């Protein structure tokens, strides 16, 4: 009987008064170490490695929108020189050529439909990277503006708003309707 | 008899002294602050990123793997030849990139390669790296760029 009583009294509790301090220190540690800045950039998907025996699928000349960037960063768009500032409008015109609501008509030198339109960017080996990014940015902005327009048709203020309300795994209808088809051509070896 | 025992056991202190606990923890904190290296890779090449407007955010940082391309930083603020850096080391031979990136892809199948390329670099080396990435099968890439503060691009 006496033994049991003694054991009860031996119970020792861990002091919890400093728990808060420990937790606080941990918090500070993680606050300091985590980086909050998000990486931003222009996303692209490279074409898979081509099988040399398989021919690439044929693309009709009128559907191809060729952009050439030379060593000085100047553009040759569809064999005509063009300033970068006008590129966005030209890309939009090419992609949305035969879509009724856009009012571009259906010009024979532009694409047949947004699905067929391919934007091809080709650079030289000496082209400055900055110039290439400028061109790629303008092409993407053209697509973003088209998507913005499609989102407004569906009653969303912008494409961003439309995309944010999508459930994970839900189909992005606008992107499926107008796919961005940008091809990066390999520069000629020099 | 039993009363005598009780009194004796009550006299011995069973509590751990907590007065010095904050000090101990503080010392631990300082120890870790001094010793931990926050695995930030030291970039040995200059990467002044180009500016762009059509940006997308990548919040899944653990999917990212960086490739730095730019002129080498030398002593006295001088810049050397354009070099490629993956993780901590400079890549001497471009054709080794496919093996390096393939191994990373096996570890992380949803890998996104972030190309941090200096704006003054030439496209030749960027293309060479991209060809290597195609060989490795790491097709999702991202041209890291800063937000255009001025707004309108296309100054011509």
Image (spheres, coloured by chain):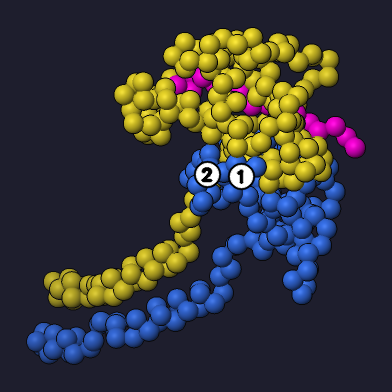
Chain colours: A yellow, B blue
- Vertical position of residue A108 compared to residue A15: above or below: above
Q: Is residue A83 left or right of residue B52?
A: right
- Seen at 78% across and 73% down, the residue is B75
Q: Nearer the viewer, residue A24 or A177?
A: A177
> Can residue B148 be seen by looking at this rendering?
yes
Q: Are marks 2 and 1 in contact (CB under 8 Å)?
A: yes
How many numbered tags mark residues here?
2
> Can residue A184 be seen by looking at this rendering?
no
Mark 1 Cα shell of 10 Å, populated few (<14), some (14-19), many (≥20) = few
Query: Chain ID for label 1?
Result: B
The range drawn in magenta is A174-190
- Vertical position of residue B112 compared to residue B93: above or below: above
- Vertical position of residue B70 compared to residue B97: above or below: below
Q: Is residue A10 left or right of residue B137?
A: left
Q: Is residue A152 magenta?
A: no
Q: Position of residue A172 (x, y in %)?
A: 44, 23
Q: Nearer the viewer, residue B49 or A96?
A: A96
- Seen at 49% across and 31% down, the residue is A144
Mark 2 Cα shell of 10 Å, populated few (<14), some (14-19), many (≥20) = few
Circle 1 sits on which residue?
A: B155
Q: Position of residue A169 (x, y in %)?
A: 42, 26
Q: Is residue B141 left or right of residue A31?
A: right
Circle 2 sits on which residue?
A: B152
């Amino acid at each position: 009987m006496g033994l049991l009583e003694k054991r009860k009294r031996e119970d020792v509790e861990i002091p919890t008064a400093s728990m808060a301090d420990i937790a606080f220190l941990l918090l500070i540690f993680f606050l300091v170490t985590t980086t909050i800045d998000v990486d931003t950039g222009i996303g692209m998907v490279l074409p898979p490695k081509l099988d040399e025996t398989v021919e690439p699928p044929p693309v009709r000349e009128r559907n191809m929108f060729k952009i050439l960037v030379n060593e000085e960063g100047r553009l040759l768009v569809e064999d005509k020189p063009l300033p970068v500032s006008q590129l966005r409008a030209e890309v939009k015109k090419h992609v949305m050529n035969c879509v009724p609501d856009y009012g571009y008509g259906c010009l024979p030198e532009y694409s047949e439909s947004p699905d067929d339109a391919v934007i091809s960017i080709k650079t030289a080996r000496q082209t400055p990277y900055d110039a290439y990014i400028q061109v790629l940015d303008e092409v993407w902005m053209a697509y973003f503006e088209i998507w913005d327009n499609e989102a407004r048709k569906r009653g969303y203020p912008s494409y961003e708003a439309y995309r944010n309300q999508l459930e994970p795994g839900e189909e992005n209808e606008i992107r499926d309707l107008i796919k961005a088809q940008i091809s990066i051509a390999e520069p000629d070896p020099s | 008899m039993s009363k005598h025992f009780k009194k004796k056991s009550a006299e011995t202190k069973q509590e751990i002294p907590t007065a010095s606990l904050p000090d101990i923890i503080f010392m631990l904190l300082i120890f870790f602050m001094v010793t931990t290296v926050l695995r930030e890779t030291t970039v040995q090449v200059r990467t002044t990123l180009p500016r762009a407007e059509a940006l997308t955010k990548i919040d899944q940082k653990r999917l990212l793997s960086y490739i730095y391309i730019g002129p080498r930083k030398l002593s006295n603020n001088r810049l050397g030849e354009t070099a490629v850096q993956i993780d901590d080391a400079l890549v001497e031979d471009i054709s080794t990139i496919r093996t390096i990136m393939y191994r990373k892809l096996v570890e992380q199948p949803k890998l996104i390669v972030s190309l941090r390329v200096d704006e003054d670099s030439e496209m030749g080396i960027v293309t060479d790296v991209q060809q290597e990435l195609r060989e490795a099968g790491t097709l999702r890439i991202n041209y890291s760029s800063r937000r255009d503060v001025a707004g309108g691009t296309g100054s011509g």
